[in-house]
Image (cartoon, grey):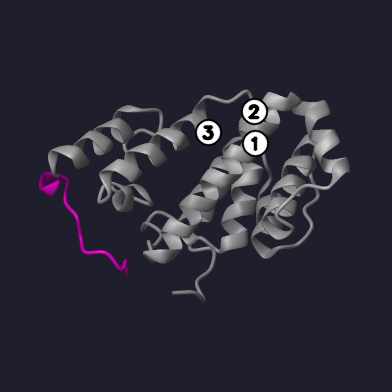
Amino acid sequence: MSRLSLLEVDDLSAEQRVIYDAIQSGPRGAMGLAGPFGVWVRAPAVGNAIQQLGAAARFATSLDEATKEIAICTVGAHFKAKFELAAHKNLAQRAGISAEVTEAIQKGEPPDFATDEHQLSHRMASQLLNQHRLDDDTYRQGVELWGESGMIELVTVIGYYCIVSLTLNTFEIPVSDAMQDPFPELP
């Protein structure tokens, strides 16, 4: 049960409707007010900026989907963000990441990645979340693999999904009926 009151599309103000329409018409598709979007439409100035950042981080980078989804799942698992991890485990698997890898990430266990790139994405997200910085070796490997631009993009993906996770957890946004709750022991 969310901490927020139910919000219907028909009740949105003109400013809120701009955000809603941008989300609906973009590559995220028909998300409605699910997940963090139902939160962000309530604060239009901040919400619109955040959803624009999210659209860029998800759909306008040079990074492949699997690399992004590993980082996103790592963030969702770190924060135990139910909606986020449930949604992105499915997206990761569609991007070619095995269920065994997403389950290991969820449990905080070391995954057995298929590629060095996937392992580096997970290591980079883990270091930023736990140590708040990257060690020199991880940074060097990331620049060699993705270049400076790709590193900036991956850091942005990780940071954006920290915002998503904190939003979901603060307002206790539940998983949808179609999702499997990755952390049923939590509220």
Query: Which of the labelled discs sits on residue 63, or is there none?
Result: 2
Residue at 84% of width from left, 34% of height from top?
Answer: 141
Magenta span: 1-12
Residue 183, position as x, y percentages in the image: 53, 68
Identify residue type, mark 2.
Leu
- Pointer 1 and pointer 2: residues touching (CB < 8 Å)? yes
Count of numbered circles in the view: 3
Cα distance between the residues tagged 1 and 2? 8 Å
Say few, some or many: other residues with alpha carbon within 10 Å of mark 1 (under 14 / 14 to 19 / 20 or more).
Answer: many
Location of residue 134 in the rendering, given as x and y in whole percent from the top left corner: 78, 47
What amino acid is at disc 3? Ala
Position in image of residue 54 (x %, y %): 46, 37
Helix, strand, or loop for circle 1?
helix
Magenta stretch, main secondary structure, is: loop
Rate crowding at label 3 as few (under 14), some (14 to 19) or many (20 or more) other CA atoms within 10 Å: many
Residue found 64% across the figure and 36% down from its top: 154
Asked whether residue 110 is in view, the answer is yes
Residue named by callout 3: 57
Q: Which residue is mark 1?
A: 154
